Image: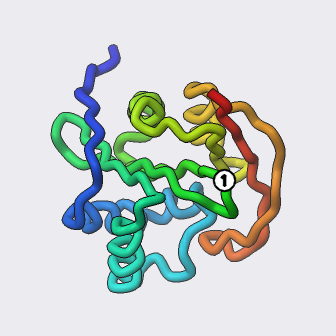
Amino acid sequence: MHTVHSILLRPTVLSDLEAFFVFQLDPEANYMAAFTSKDGTDKQAYLAKYTALLQNPTINMQTVLVDGAIAGSISKFELEGDAEITYWFDKKWWGKGIASAALRQFLLLESTRPIYGRVAFDNIGSQKVLEAAGFRKTGTDRGFAHARQTEIEEAIYKLDQ
């Protein structure tokens, strides 16, 4: 039986960054995300980076609340002129449909199209989240994944409408 959860998105505030920092310390989550910062354990660097991003008007950063508690984040940012989406959820919410529901809500708030998503070739869960929201795989790329200390393939997804 599936538990029904209340999922709410709100603009990210500075105090949310503490929870986000803890989420990204998880080794399995880091491995799946693959394309992470060089040193995810440097809290000062993390907070400085994301505090600056919160001030950037081209970034739409939303905090995802599940039953009132911070469960993750979803953001739109621009990379080389293209709108990209990124999300990160506390591992305890994986596989429960939370990311898919939150992404659908986010796409109602964020109207920039096309919008792209990039995901490690073996992160099947994240690929399913993008596909459930209407993203279609349009290609692949290769890049250095700090969390894996090697170059890997990533799938590129695109949502046109």
**From the viewer's perspective, is 123 left or right of 100?**
right
The quarter holding residue 19 reads bottom left
Q: What element carries label 1?
A: strand
Q: Against 146, is 92 above or below?
A: above
Q: Name the residue under label 1.
A: 82
Q: Position of residue 119 (x, y in %)?
A: 66, 50
Screen quadrant of the N terminus: top left
Instruction: Answer above or below: position of 96 versus 89.
Output: above
| Residue 139 location, quadrant | top right
Q: Judge whether 13 appears above or below 117 on screen.
A: below
**Residue at 75% across, 47% down:** 155
Q: Which residue lies furthest to the top in this view?
A: 1
Q: Visible in this render: residue 155?
A: yes
Residue type indicated by callout 1: Asp
How crowded is the residue under tag 1: few (<14 C-alpha within 10 Å), some, or many (20+)? few
Q: Position of residue 101 (x, y in %)?
A: 41, 28
Q: What residue do we see at 25% from left, 67% from top?
A: 18
| Relative to 128, residue 75 above or below | below
Report which quarter residue 37 is drawn in. Answer: bottom right
Q: Position of residue 83 (x, y in %)?
A: 60, 50
Q: Viewed as shown, does residue 59 lie left or right of 83?
A: left
The answer to whether any part of residue 97 appears in the image is: no
Q: Quadrant of the C terminus?
A: top right
Q: Residue at x 79, y 57 (%)?
A: 153
Q: How many marks?
A: 1
Residue under the point 25% across and 37% down: 66
Which is nearer the eye, 43 or 116?
Answer: 116
Q: Which of 106 and 29 is in front in this view?
A: 106
